[in-house]
Amino acid sequence: MIREEIKKIEKMGRMPNESLNDDASIDKQIEQYDELLQSIVKPISLQEGEVLIKIFPENSFYDLQWTLLHLVESLFGKIDNNKYQDLIKNCPSVEWKETLNVRLNNVMDKI
């Protein structure tokens, strides 16, 4: 089951990239993503992870990508490692896919 907050994020779509050209109109969008992401209690379900993994910005979006990363990482240890790795493969951002993989490998090296 997917929580309402995550359904709302899904409707908002993928986070845009932060830009030096952003004007004040972006503030409302930042606020919406932030409020919804902050309201999600961890851990998330695999189905919720499948939604959230798709909204990573290409590079960054006012540090909200870190909140998103921590939500996705809440799945580690809760689902099969192969499913977690498959989830990471669905990340549309090369940068954040790599970051998730590096962080996963770091944890696996310590186990």
Image (cartoon, grey):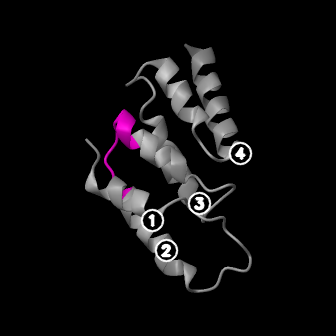
The Cα–Cα distance between marks 2 and 3, rounded to whole angstroms, is 13 Å
What residue sits right under mark 4 in the picture?
Answer: 95
The 10 Å Cα crowd at callout 4, few under 14, some 14 to 19, many 20 or more, is some
Confirm or deny contact between disc 1 and disc 2 (CB under 8 A): yes
* Disc 2: which residue: 29
N-term mark: 2 or 3 = 2
Mark toward the start of the polypeptide (4 vs 1): 1
Toward the top, the furthest residue is 111
| Quadrant showing the C terminus | top right
Please say if the residues under marks 3 and 1 sit with CB atoms less than 8 Å apart. Answer: no
The segment highlighted magenta reads 38-48
Q: Main secondary structure of the magenta part?
A: loop
| Quarter of the image where the N terminus is located | top left
In x, y percent, where is residue 102?
67, 30
Where does label 1 land, which residue? 12
Q: Nearer the viewer, residue 67 or 6?
A: 6
